[in-house]
Image: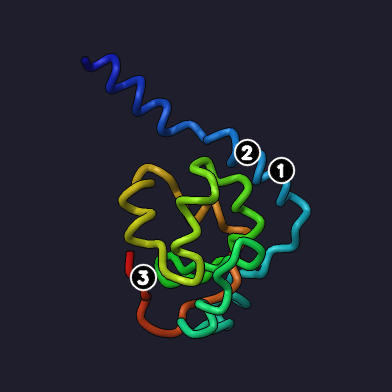
Amino acid sequence: ENIITIFHLHQMRRQHPTFEHFQKAMANVNQMSVEDAMNNKITNEELRKHSTYKDAWVSYRGLVYDVTPYLNFHPGGLGCYSTYFGYDITKIASGIHGFVNIQQTIQKCLIGKLDGEAQTPVV
């Protein structure tokens, strides 16, 4: 039983291959500086305007990300993500991906700071 547990922990710590592909795809993309992102306040109203596969923004721990370029690389596929386009993913992502450093994964997608209380969709 302990061997299986250790094996699974090791597997969870490894980067998913799609993360590596995403990092390579984004290698030459100019990332907004953290300072500029912190000064770019985005309201919930603005966040919700970006709720399609072609224009998908989410907030996570008070920061806003344009995850559109990441969608095709998400290991769980597109379907599990779409309900949260335009909303906060902190609670759902922390529950499902507690072992993943989400901010590191989508760091290059950072576009601003949420101006207001995080809101989640009614599911």
View extreme (right): residue: 28
Locate residue 35 relative to residue 85 in the image: left or right.
right
Residue 8 image offset from top left, x and y in percent: 35, 25
The local secondary structure at tag 3 comes to: loop
Separation of residues labelled 2 and 1 (CA atoms): 6 Å
* Residue closest to the eye, 117 or 81: 81
Q: Amino acid at mark 2?
A: Glu
User: Along the line of sight, which residue is nearer the eye, 110 or 82?
Assistant: 82
**Neighbours of disc 1 within 10 Å: few (<14), some (14-19), many (20+):** few
Give the distance between the C-alpha atoms of the residues marked 3 and 1, in whole angstroms.
31 Å
Badge 1 marks a residue whose secondary structure is helix
Number of marks in the image? 3
Taking the spot 56% from the left edge, 79% from the top edge, the residue there is 49
User: Measured from the top left, where is residue 103 in percent x and y?
Assistant: 49, 56
SS state under label 2:
helix
Residue at figure coordinates x 35%, y 28% from the top left: 9
Q: Position of residue 24 (x, y in %)?
A: 71, 43
In the image, residue 27 above or below residue 56: above
Q: Which mark is residue 24?
A: 1
Q: Of label 2 and label 3, which has the lower sequence position?
A: 2
Q: Residue at x 57, y 58 (%)?
A: 107
Residue placed under numbered mark 2 in the picture: 20
Contact, CB < 8 Å: mark 2 with mark 3? no
Callout in the foreground (2, 3): 3
Q: Which amino acid is tagged 1?
A: Lys
In the drawing, what numbered circle is on residue 120? Answer: 3
Q: Amino acid at mark 3?
A: Thr
Relative placement, left or right, of 30 versus 6 is right
Q: Quadrant of residue 112?
A: bottom right
Sequence-first disc among 3 and 1:
1
